[in-house]
Amino acid sequence: MKRLLIALLIGLCSTALSGQFYDFLSENKSATFGFSAEHDFILVKVRFANVLPLNFIFDTGSEHTILFKKEYADLLGVEYDRKIPLFGADMADQIYAYIARGIELNVDGKLQFTSDVLVMEADYLHLEEFTGINIDGILGANLFRHLVLQIDNKKDRITLLSPNKFKPPKRHMQFEIDIQQSKPYLTTLARAGGEEITLKLLLDTGASLPLLLYTNTHSNLELPPQAILGNLGMGLGGFLQGYVGRVEFLDFADYRFSNLVTSFQDIILDSLMTNTTGRNGIIGNSLLGRYNLMIDYNQGHLYLKANRKYRRKFKYDKSGLTIAATGADLRSFIIQRVVSDSPAAEAGLQKGDLIKSMKGIPASFYTLAALNSTLSSKVGKVVRIVVSRNGVRLKKKVKLRELI
């Protein structure tokens, strides 16, 4: 199941971090750099401390720039200002990060600047296991919150524009958004199991899902009849538990998505999470990536233009398997979870089984994305899987079907 949400920094003890692209643009109208779109994330090449090449997620849903792996900072002799507590995704577990001041960062070999960075005490997310790609950190809104952000999902490039030199684009639709705590929110309509309701949703490029709704933030938000229990992704403090189903429709600006794959989660109604923003959920990059979009953080405007990805179907797993990538090259695969009463369960697959081959092809020839794509293909397809269980090779056949 490919439903990945990064729930980071729910509570940050009111710590302010500096650093932005704004100084870089003081004498320029704009700055542009490329990215790669993988696993519905926007991945940017970042040279940390101007030395170490790493992969960072470009994340409009995070207030801060974050390094997941403290060993990299330690290797470079980075000094820390202080240690601060953070809250995990369940608002109960407290974990820690260190503030590193004035770190030199180089983005895509084109933008050189300094920024404060939060360095996680440990890599709590282990995103490699659930994406099959190396992800080392996040570029957050502390870098672009005073600018105009343009994400071209057709050409895979990001442009940052100085607000006093920005002119609204032609052939884009303009919408009002709220900017709170450096994050963009859109108010829109949806129907999820009950009446048509108005929702306030975070526009979050750091979530590789189409839509996440917090079911206990609105009296008319209901789970659909056909929903399955599962892990929605990883957050600070562990797996994010919830359900996956479909909403009847979601209006995104002037666009309506019907029967949209949606994650559902109850959330602790704490002032750190909901009372300050009143949000009901998240629109993630699986949906946002279907547009070329611009966010004017100063004026509170969103500009949208659909690209060629707009009409693509939202794929979802039809096997009932959650697979994790392991090994130095992330080309070994282990079954992390099997949904009850699913095709995988009926085939006799179990948690802990090592996948040795799929469709007659050795597992090492696959990426995790390719495995998940195979398991998300058309209904009725039979996928032959060979697994190793306690040293014994077992052959299984999984007949795909709709689970939600």
Image (tube, rainbow, N blue to C red):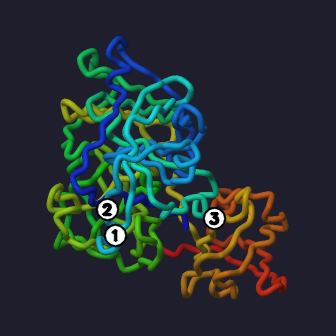
Residue beneath label 3, please? 378
Residue 249 in view of the camera: yes
- Left-right relation of 211 to 301: right
Q: CA distance from mark 3 to mark 2?
A: 46 Å
Q: Which mark is residue 94?
A: 1
Q: Which residue is mark 2?
A: 85
Whether residue 347 is situated above or below residue 79 in the rendered picture: below
Asked if residue 249 lies left or right of residue 379, the reply is: left
> Could you tell me which residue is drawn at 37 percent across and 39 percent down?
101
Q: Is residue 316 above or below residue 291?
A: below
Q: Amino acid at mark 2?
A: Pro
Label 3 SS: loop
Give me the disc on residue 176. Answer: none
Question: Quick check: can you spot residue 155?
Answer: no
> Where the N terminus falls, by quadrant?
bottom right
Relative to 35, is 160 above or below? Answer: above
Q: Earlier in the sequence, mark 3 or mark 2?
A: 2
Q: Tell me which numbered mark, 1 or 3, is placed earlier along the sequence.
A: 1
- Amino acid of disc 3: Lys
